[in-house]
Each structure stands twice: as structure tokens, then as C-alpha cells.
């Protein structure tokens, strides 16, 4: 196996553990055990856990960006894009430990900075672009301030991970995200947009039902 392949395998394995258990509770021993390799192998490619965390964060965010770029390119309009985004968000957070962002913020400043840059630059610009597109298409209210609402959307995303606000023994991360996402979307829709949003959601639900095997 080539060096590049080994490093990517380590990143994927570490990412699986971080998403499931959070970052703080996963040790280098855990990563080595999960991958069935020695700790010495890990240290051949990464100086320490912090470097693994930082590299995993950049790797994960880059993959998300590619996924959302592809989604945007395939969307028929701003509403279709939002419905597809909601599906990606739900799938992503269903396998994510709520403590993940807190762990990055408190213990891994490099990875946290990567997340903040991704949030402000990529997600923020994407939300503004989608809002402006939706206004032009007549789906979103023309009087909304796209900068203010994009900022609100970004903070809602981060708020969903705050376990003091949404304790994980009471709320699921997926449900919190879907409720906040719908709340945001319905707040910007015109009557035309609401009808289109609900139609696309119904079509998605029907497609998911058809694609689910009957046991």
C-alpha cells in the first residue's frame, strides 16, 4: 500500500471514531486499535493526536464542500437545492456526536479555526448565494436582508451542537437540526416558495419510501 493510501486510511478511520465518540474521548491507542495498526505507524505519518485532528477536520470539510458543490450543480432551483441540503444535513448529523464541535473549540484550536473558516467563507457564501437566487426566482421574500439571515443560519448550525441548550439525553442532534432548518426556510419563503418547498419535500419522501426495501 502506498504512503498516500495509508495516510488516507488513517484519516478515514480516525474520522469515523471522532464522529461517533467525539474527539476528546478518542486516544491514539483507540485509533490504532480501530485500524489494526501499531501506534508507531500512526506516528510515522502524524506528529501527535492534534495533527491527526487538524488533518481530519480539513479532510472532512473538503469532502463536504465537494459534496455540496455537486449538489448545487444538480439542483433545479434554490428550493430544490435546499431540500437536497436538508437530506445531506440529516444524514451527516445522524452519525455525529454532539460534543464534536465543543471538543474542537476547547482542545484543538487549529481544527477549530478550520471549522470557523469553513463556516464563514464557504457555508456563509453558499447561504447568501442561495438566498439571492431564491429571491430572483420568486421563491424567497424580496425584503429579506441576506447577510443578516445568512449569519443567523450559521449561528443556528453551531447552536444545535450546544449541549447546554439541547442536551443529548433529551434531543437528538438530527431532530434539532431539521427543526431549525425548517424554521429558517419557512421564514424566508413566499407563498410560491412554500408550495414549491412542500412539493419537493413530498417528492423526496416518496422517492425515499420507494427506495426503502420491504422486509
Image (spheres, grey):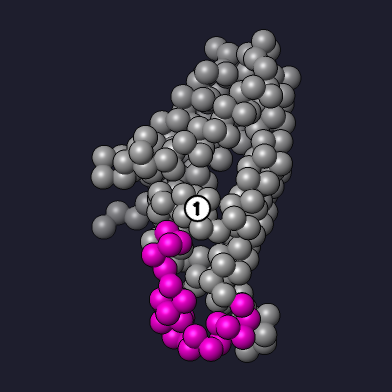
Q: Residue at x 52, y 18 (%)?
A: 187
Residue 106 rendering spot, x and y as whole percentages = 50, 52
Residue 113 lies within the magenta run? no
Q: Secondary structure at mark 1?
A: helix
Q: Residue at x 62, y 66 (%)?
A: 55
Of residues 41 and 59, which is closer to you in this image?
Answer: 41
Q: Is residue 61 above or below residue 164?
A: below
Q: Residue at x 50, y 44 (%)?
A: 89
Q: Quadrant of the N terminus?
A: bottom right
Residue 37 in view in this figure: yes
Residue identifier under label 1: 106
Q: Is residue 141 above or below residue 60?
A: above
The magenta-colored residue range is 22-47
Q: Quadrant of the C terminus?
A: bottom left
Q: Relative to residue 34, is residue 88 drawn left or right?
A: right
Of residues 15 and 159, which is closer to you in this image?
Answer: 159
Amino acid at each position: 500500500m502506498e504512503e498516500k493510501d495509508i495516510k488516507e486510511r488513517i484519516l478515514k478511520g480516525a474520522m469515523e471514531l471522532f464522529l461517533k465518540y467525539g474527539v476528546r474521548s478518542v486516544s491514539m491507542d483507540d485509533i490504532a486499535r480501530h485500524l489494526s495498526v501499531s501506534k508507531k505507524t500512526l506516528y510515522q505519518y502524524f506528529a501527535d493526536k492534534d495533527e491527526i485532528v487538524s488533518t481530519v477536520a480539513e479532510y472532512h470539510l473538503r469532502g463536504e464542500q465537494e459534496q455540496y458543490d455537486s449538489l448545487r450543480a444538480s439542483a433545479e432551483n434554490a428550493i430544490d437545492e435546499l431540500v437536497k441540503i436538508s437530506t445531506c444535513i440529516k444524514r451527516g448529523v445522524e452519525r455525529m456526536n454532539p460534543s464534536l464541535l465543543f471538543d474542537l473549540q476547547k482542545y484543538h484550536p487549529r481544527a477549530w479555526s478550520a471549522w470557523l473558516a469553513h463556516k464563514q467563507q464557504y457555508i456563509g457564501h453558499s447561504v447568501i448565494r442561495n438566498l439571492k437566487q431564491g429571491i430572483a426566482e420568486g421563491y424567497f421574500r424580496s425584503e429579506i436582508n441576506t447577510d443578516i439571515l445568512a449569519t443567523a443560519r450559521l449561528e443556528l448550525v453551531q447552536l444545535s451542537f450546544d449541549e447546554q441548550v439541547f442536551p443529548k439525553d433529551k434531543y437528538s442532534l438530527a431532530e434539532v437540526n431539521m427543526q431549525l432548518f425548517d424554521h429558517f426556510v419557512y421564514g424566508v419563503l413566499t407563498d410560491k416558495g412554500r408550495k414549491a418547498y412542500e412539493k419537493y419535500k413530498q417528492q423526496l419522501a416518496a422517492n425515499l419510501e420507494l427506495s426503502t426495501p420491504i422486509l
